[in-house]
C-alpha cells in the first residue's frame, strides 16, 4: 500500500496532539507502519501548530512535503488556508469553521480573510467544513473539538467504529471517554459540510 499522509493543523491548546495520537493508535492497530511527528510550531495557546501522521506498508519518514497530504484536518479556518499548498490535487480538507484571530489581526495590523471556506473550494480542494465548536459544546465541552474532527474524518476511512473507539480508549482518560465518544458521534453524523 502506498503511504497516506494526514496533516493535523490548528492553534496551540486546541487538542491536536490528542487527535494525532488517537489517529496513530487507530492506524497501528490496523497493522500499518505509522509515523507520527511531534507537534511543530508554537504549542503555547495561540500559535500555529502542525502534526504529521503518515501510514502505509513501510513509512520511512514522518515528514510531509508540499503537495503530498491526502487529508488536512484543521481546527481553525485560517490554518486550513495556511497549509493548503501541502494538499494533494485530489486531497480533502476536513475543517472546523471556527475563526481564531492571530496576533496581526488582534493588533489591527491585518484583517481576518473573508469567506475562507469559499476560497478553499475555489482552489479546487474538496472541503468538508462543519461547526465543531457547536458540536463539542453539545457533547459537553468545547475541548472535545478534536474528537468531533476525528468523527468527521472517520467518514473517509473504511474502518469499523469499534476500531476508532478502541484507539480513543488508549489515549483518552476514562473519566472523559463518554464525552469524547459523544463528540465523535456528533462529528461523524453532522450534516454534510461539503
Image (tube, helix red, strand yellow):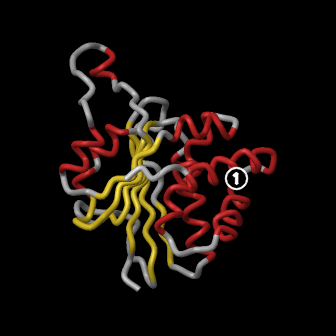
Front residue of 102/63: it is 102
**Identity of the residue furthest to the right in this view:** 175
Q: In the drawing, does residue 162 fall left or right of residue 82?
A: right
Front residue of 80/31: it is 80
Q: How many marks?
A: 1
Q: In the drawing, does residue 170 fall left or right of residue 120?
A: right
**Identity of the residue furthest to the top in this view:** 108
Report crowding for label 1: few under 14, some 14 to 19, many 20 or more residues within 10 A (C-alpha): many
Q: Quadrant of residue 112?
A: top left
Q: Is residue 50 visible?
A: no
Residue 86 horizontal/vertical position (percent): 26, 57
Residue 167 higher or lower than 102, as above or below: below
Residue 132 horizontal/vertical position (percent): 52, 41
Residue 31 higher or lower than 172, as above or below: below
Residue 114 higher or lower than 43, as above or below: above
**Identity of the residue furthest to the front in this view:** 191
Residue at horizontal 75 percent and vertical 45 percent from the top? 176
Quadrant, the N terminus = bottom left
Residue 138 horizontal/vertical position (percent): 65, 37
Residue at horizontal 55 percent and vertical 65 percent from the top? 24
Q: Quadrant of residue 64?
A: bottom left
Residue at horizontal 39 percent and vertical 31 percent from the top? 99
Q: Quadrant of residue 162?
A: bottom right
Residue 107 higher or lower than 159, as above or below: above
Residue at horizontal 30 percent and vertical 42 percent from the top? 117
Front residue of 12/97: it is 97
Q: Which residue is mark 1?
A: 181
Q: Is residue 29 visible?
A: yes
Element at badge 1? helix
Amino acid at each position: 500500500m502506498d503511504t497516506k499522509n494526514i496533516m493535523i493543523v490548528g492553534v496551540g491548546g486546541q487538542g491536536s496532539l490528542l487527535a494525532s495520537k488517537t489517529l496513530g493508535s487507530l492506524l497501528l492497530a490496523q497493522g500499518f507502519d505509522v509515523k507520527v511527528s511531534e507537534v511543530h510550531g508554537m504549542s503555547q495557546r495561540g500559535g500555529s501548530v502542525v502534526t504529521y501522521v503518515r501510514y502505509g506498508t513501510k513509512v520511512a519518514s514522518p515528514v510531509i512535503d508540499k503537495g503530498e497530504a491526502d487529508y488536512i484536518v484543521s481546527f481553525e479556518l485560517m490554518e486550513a488556508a495556511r497549509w493548503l499548498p501541502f494538499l494533494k490535487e485530489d486531497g480533502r480538507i476536513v475543517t472546523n469553521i471556527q475563526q481564531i484571530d492571530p496576533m496581526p489581526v488582534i493588533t489591527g495590523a491585518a484583517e481576518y480573510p473573508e469567506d475562507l471556506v469559499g476560497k478553499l473550494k475555489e482552489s479546487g480542494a474538496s472541503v468538508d467544513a462543519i461547526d465543531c465548536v457547536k458540536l463539542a459544546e453539545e457533547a459537553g465541552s468545547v475541548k472535545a473539538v478534536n474528537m468531533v474532527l476525528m468523527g468527521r474524518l472517520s467518514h473517509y476511512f473504511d474502518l469499523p467504529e469499534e476500531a476508532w473507539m478502541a484507539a480513543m480508549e488508549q489515549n483518552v482518560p476514562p473519566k472523559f471517554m463518554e464525552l469524547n465518544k459523544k463528540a465523535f458521534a456528533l462529528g461523524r453524523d453532522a450534516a454534510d459540510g461539503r
